[in-house]
Image (spheres, rainbow, N blue to C red):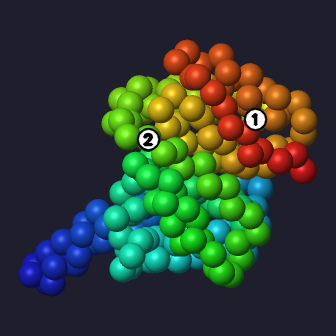
């Protein structure tokens, strides 16, 4: 039992360590508890995995660590930074033809300079905390990324007032320079 148990433990730790890589470092495989049904959640997860599989293959491999993928109800949002417009366009081609994709927002920035990652992480943490603490906001229904002080948000609000409150919270977060709103109201 000792050796077999050790092998199983090491295998489990290795698998858990690989999950962020499979999901492009920070996209979740599945989020249960939001307003999507189980089938839509699984379809979105399949879209994320298929995009990441394409990003890890051949011509798209250089983009894997430069872009982030978020999917909510069949809508794909690509964010991150690349040095050339041609790379931005290539990233959009990754999503082309995938089953279940209804819409694609290519929000990848073309920039030569480095990303302000620490500031973006600070903004993200503030927004996450404020949305989790807010009453009447189901934060699991939103996906957002912060890239060079711009917040890109995707999701579905239950009511126009919920969407307005989410956007107000983001706007009032210090250091946010802009918001790209891709939130739909049911």
163 or 98, nearer to the observer = 98
Estimate how packed mark 2 is, as few (under 14), some (14 to 19) or many (20 or more) residues with alpha carbons within 10 Å.
Answer: some
Give the quarter of the image for residue 178.
top right
Q: Secondary structure at mark 2?
A: loop
> Looking at the image, is 135 positioned above or below residue 73?
above
> Looking at the image, is 90 positioned above or below residue 158?
below
69 left or right, relative to 1: right
93 or 17, nearer to the observer = 93
Q: Residue 21, percent across and down?
A: 35, 64
110 left or right, relative to 164: left
Distance between the alpha carbons at the discs numbered 1 and 2: 34 Å
Which residue corresponds to the image point at 62% horizontal and 40% vertical from the top-left?
Answer: 152
Q: Which residue lies under the disc numbered 2?
A: 111
Q: Which mark is residue 70?
A: none
Q: Residue 36, percent across and down?
A: 75, 61
Q: Residue 168, percent across and down?
A: 74, 22
Q: Which mark is residue 137?
A: 1
Q: Residue 85, percent across and down?
A: 50, 54
Q: Quadrant of the N terminus?
A: bottom left
């Amino acid at each position: 039992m000792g050796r077999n148990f050790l092998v199983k433990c090491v295998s489990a730790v290795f698998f858990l360590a690989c999950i962020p890589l499979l999901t492009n470092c920070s996209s979740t495989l599945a989020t249960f508890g939001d307003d999507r049904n189980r089938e839509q959640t699984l379809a979105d997860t399949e879209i994320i995995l298929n995009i990441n599989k394409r990003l890890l293959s051949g011509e798209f491999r250089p983009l894997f660590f430069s872009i982030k993928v978020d999917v909510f109800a069949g809508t794909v949002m690509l964010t991150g930074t690349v040095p050339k417009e041609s790379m931005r366009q290539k990233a959009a081609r990754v999503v082309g033809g995938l089953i279940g994709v209804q819409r694609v927002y290519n929000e990848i920035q073309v920039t030569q300079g480095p990303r302000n990652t620490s500031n973006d992480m600070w903004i993200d943490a503030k927004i996450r905390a404020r949305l989790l603490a807010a009453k009447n906001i189901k934060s699991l229904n939103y996906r957002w990324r912060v890239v060079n002080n711009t917040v890109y948000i995707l999701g579905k609000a239950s009511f126009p007032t919920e969407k307005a409150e989410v956007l107000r919270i983001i706007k009032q977060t210090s250091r946010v320079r802009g918001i790209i709103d891709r939130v739909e109201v049911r």
